Image: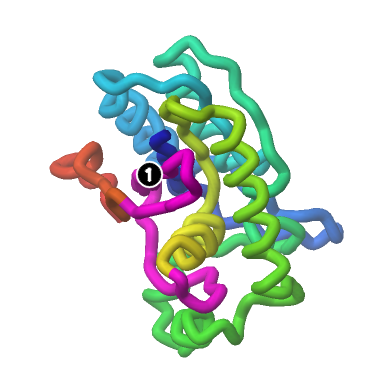
């Protein structure tokens, strides 16, 4: 089967002071990215669409679900590693600050209270459950950069990581899942739907 693991669109920067999780919605550019994604994939066939329950993933998946007339299926196991954080700062802003935070993140020193092994196990188990339920089909999973990194690292046999590469907003990452158990990467970071739009962050 083919599984398309898609990152959400650009969200707002959010800081909460009431103890609740930031869980931001998409910014205007993020909504535009999500629509471009749905339009781009219209020529393909999808049998099912899954999404993280976090707002930015949910909103990104909505145009895709409308395009194909499919119901959205939510899975907690593909929520982001920092889902309970009171602050969300887009990665692009972190990188632009040039204060060492991005480098620390890539070294695995800024992953907060989440155990990377436990996070990867949850991600892998969830995606494998989706694969098992859709043998011979093509499925999309709209989720987060950390989730994509965790599963791609698993397929490549790399150490657990939430940041070994940077998936762009609404990038498409394709995995081929053989019924015999082999997993291979067909592509990472497809962003052709954003070229020439000014939306490729």
Q: Is residue 86 visible in this depiction of the protein?
A: yes
Quarter-wise, where is residue 54 in the image?
A: top right
Specify the farthest residue to the top: 69
Which quadrant holds the N terminus?
top left
User: Colour scheme used in the picture?
Assistant: rainbow
Element at badge 1?
Answer: strand
For disc 1, the neighbor class at 10 Å (few under 14, some 14 to 19, many from 20) is: some
Q: Is residue 130 left or right of residue 194?
A: right
Residue that sits furthest to the front in the current view:
180
x and y percent of residue 149 in the render? 48, 63
Which residue corresponds to the image point at 25% horizontal and 19% vertical from the top-left? Answer: 43
Query: Residue at 55% of width from left, 56% of height from top?
Result: 147
User: Could you tell me which residue is drawn at 61 percent across and 61 percent down?
Assistant: 88
Above or below residue 152? Residue 110 is below
Where does label 1 land, which residue? 176
Picture coordinates of residue 137, whole percent (x, y): 44, 25
Q: Nearer the viewer, residue 178 or 22?
A: 178
Q: Nearer the viewer, residue 36 or 46?
A: 46
Does the magenta stretch mainly form a helix, a strand or a loop? Answer: loop
Q: Is residue 109 above or below residue 79?
A: below
Residue 5 occupies quadrant: top left
The tally of labels here is: 1
Placement of 152 over or under 71, stated as above or below: below
**Residue 164: within the magenta?**
yes
Q: Which residues are magenta?
A: 157-185
In terms of depth relative to the viewer, which is nearer, 168 or 49?
49
In the rendered image, the quadrant that contains the C terminus is: bottom left
**Can residue 189 be seen at all in this image of the molecule?**
no
- Which residue is at 59% across, 17% downward? 71
Front-lying residue, 6 or 112: 6
């Amino acid at each position: 089967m083919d599984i398309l693991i898609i990152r959400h669109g650009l969200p707002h920067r959010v800081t909460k002071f009431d103890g609740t999780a930031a869980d931001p919605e998409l910014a205007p550019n993020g909504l535009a990215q999500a629509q471009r994604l749905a339009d781009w994939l219209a020529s393909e066939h999808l049998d099912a669409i899954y999404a993280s329950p976090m707002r930015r993933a949910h909103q990104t998946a909505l145009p895709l679900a409308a395009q194909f007339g499919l119901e959205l299926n939510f899975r907690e196991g593909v929520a982001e590693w920092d889902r309970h954080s009171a602050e969300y700062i887009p990665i692009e802003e972190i990188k632009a600050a040039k204060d060492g935070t991005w480098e620390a993140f890539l070294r695995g020193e800024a992953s907060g209270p989440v155990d990377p092994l436990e996070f990867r196990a949850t991600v892998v188990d969830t995606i494998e459950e989706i694969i098992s339920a859709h043998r011979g089909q093509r499925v999309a999973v709209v989720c987060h950069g950390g989730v994509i990194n965790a599963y791609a690292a698993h397929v490549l046999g790399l150490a657990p990581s939430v940041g070994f590469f940077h998936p762009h907003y609404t990038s498409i990452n394709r995995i081929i899942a053989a019924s015999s158990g082999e997993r291979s990467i067909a592509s990472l970071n497809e962003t052709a739907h954003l070229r020439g739009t000014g939306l490729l962050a």
